[in-house]
Amino acid sequence: MKNYKWLLSGTIAIFMLTTIVSGTGVLASPLTDLKNEKKQNEQKKIELKSNINQKKTAIYKNKSTIDKIFDQISELNAQIEETNSNIARVEEKILHTTEDIEALQKSIKELEKKIAERDIVLRERLRAMQVKGGSVDYLDVLLGANSFSDFIDRFSAVNTLMDADRNIMEQQAKDKEQLEVEKALVEKKLAEQEENKKELQGMMASLELKKVDKNKLIDQLEVEQEKLEAEKGKLEVDLDHEHKISKEIEQKIDAEQKRIAEIAKKAEEEKKRKAAAAAKANRNNGGSSISTPTYLPNVSSGNWTRPTIGRYTSSFGWRKHPIYGATRQHRGMDIANSIGTPVVSASDGVVSYAGRMSTYGNIIMVTHSVEGQIFTTAYAHLSSIAVGVGQQVDKGQHIGNIGNTGASTGPHLHFEFHIGNWSASGSSAVNPLRYVSF
């Protein structure tokens, strides 16, 4: 009867403890929510960083375009300066040509004056040879000879006079012709210079228009640049905000993990107390005991037991990732077996996470308290999960089954062992062989 009462009271106590710990599932579930929130926060930070990089690329391209246009404007300025110099040189040539025309016109007037003076001299010569009043020609002078000797004299005089007159007339004709040719050349040259100046002025106007267009384009690009910089600045502010949120979430996760660790410690203390009471009662009742259910694999003695049975395929440490090909640190050990092979908790503890997580696929995390020291074990790539967050589990208790979920090349259990709480960086991970025999 006493034995029955002890069993009944023990059963009630265990039920109450289970109820208390199970009740903490509501309290412990925020850890899952916080980790999901952290995951969303990390995804948002990735998106913000991606958007910032896109803005940086756009800003760089926009600035490169602005720099190119400024280079083009510099070239236009050089062309404008060169054109201005050319116009100045043409204007100087036009000035000199105009001066040449004025000098030529002055020469023409002087030549006309000389021609007029030569005409006067010629007329005076004719008058000197006239033997009677009125105008006479060279034939009259010859026919007026009184004798053959006089005719010869007159003929010689007339020839001399005619040669002189012919020379004068020829020189006058040459001078006039030369002046006209020079005048025509100078006027043609002036016309060409004026046309050249007109073309240069047209080129100058075209260059100025191009420069105006380039400046307008730069104005537009600079407005776009300011917009991009403002958008990038806002994204950077948002990213900074998300970093602060991330820190707050990490602090909350740390606090929640500590809370769960405290629950695990209290559960360990309670279990020790009850084990001591049971041992005492067992001694008092002749050494009878209650059998416990057997799980696969067999539960070993000590604080830790192997989480499943199967073939040991990959150890802890650096290795070439079988999927991604890159050399990465393998933060646990792999045990291969068929899908559905039972997985058990490596020690007593409280389930701190149960669900899907990135490349881990379906994963369970259990927080343990062993002699007051906190540990966390992780069981990944599961095909199914048999426990919930906040649930107390015993060493060797069935918690899930081997699977092939997440980044996996075949059915196996990926088992991690962390000193303290689980960390995404893996800094807390150690080789499970230090604590668990396989």
Image (spheres, rainbow, N blue to C red):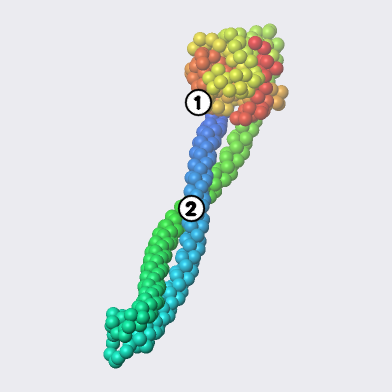
Horizontal side of residue 199 vs 30, given as left or right: left
- State which quarter of the image contains the C terminus: top right
Residue receiving disc 1? 356
Residue at image x 63%, y 23%?
329
State the SS at label 2: helix
Residue receiving disc 2? 72
Is residue 347 shown to the viewer in this render? Answer: no
Q: Nearer the viewer, residue 185 or 259?
A: 185
Check whether the beta carbons of the residues at disc 1 and disc 2 lie within 8 A of each other.
no
Is residue 349 depicted above or below 177 in this figure? above
Is residue 187 depicted above or below 344 in this figure? below
Give the image location of residue 437, x and y in percent: 67, 12
Horizontal side of residue 238 vs 306, given as left or right: left
- State which quarter of the image contains the N terminus: top right
Residue at image x 41%, y 81%?
114
Q: Nearer the viewer, residue 393 or 162?
A: 162
Residue 413 quadrant: top right
Disc 1 and disc 2: Cα gap in Å?
Answer: 58 Å
Residue at image x 49%, y 19%?
405
